[in-house]
Amino acid sequence: MSEDPRQSLGKMGEHLACAELQRRGYAILACRYRTRHGEIDIVARDGETMVFVEVKARRGARFGGGAAAVTGWKQQRIVRMATDYLARRGLLESPCRFDVVAIDVEGGRPRIDVYVDAFTAGG
């Protein structure tokens, strides 16, 4: 049974995002962290700051590109999952932020954009 093309694109996007974040000095702590609320693509540390990363890979910008796909509803889910991650590890007092990595795969090389502090826990 072959893999769904969207899943394949998603896995490739997460791999590219991890490589780019590591290049920028982030320490990757977890990939595909699952909770009852869903999944966080990447959990990382940037210095002393915990970073919860949503990866959006798209083939072209027909539907607004990767960054446009992180809606308010999705942001709320990510915040709940991040709170779960921090609580389970006794890190609720740690500084944290939410980044988005948008990967647009159209034509030749993928374009990777990292949106640091893309949204806040308050929405």
Image (tube, rainbow, N blue to C red):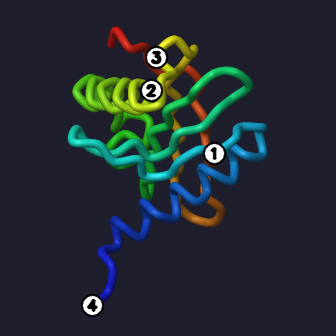
List x then y, in percent, for residue 109: 65, 62
Mark 1 highlights which residue?
28
Q: Earlier in the sequence, mark 4 or mark 3?
A: 4
Tag 2–tag 3 contact (CB < 8 Å) = yes
State the count of labels: 4
Kind of residue sitting beneath label 4: Met
Q: Which of labels 4 and 1 is toward the front?
A: 1
| Label 4 sits on residue | 1
Marks 3/1: CA–CA distance: 19 Å
Label 1 is placed on what type of residue?
Ile
Task: Identify whether 19 is placed above or below 101.
Answer: below
Disc ID at residue 86: 2
Along the polypeptide, which appears first: circle 2 or circle 4? 4
Residue tagged by mark 3?
92
Say if mark 4 contacts mark 1, CB within 8 Å: no
- Mark 3 element type: loop
Query: In which quadrant of the rendered view does residue 24 lie?
Result: top right
Residue located 44% across and 46% down the image: 41
User: Residue 25 lies in what quarter of the image?
Assistant: top right
Question: Could you tell which of marks 1 and 2 lies nearer the N-terminus?
Answer: 1
Q: Which is in the foreground here, disc 1 or disc 2?
A: 2
Tag 2: residue type? Answer: Leu
At x 43%, y 59%, the residue is 59
- In the image, what residue occupies the spot 27% across and 30% down? 77
Alpha-carbon span between mark 4 and mark 1: 31 Å
**Which quadrant: the N terminus?**
bottom left
- State whether residue 72 is above or below residue 10: above
Q: Assign a secondary structure to mark 2.
A: helix
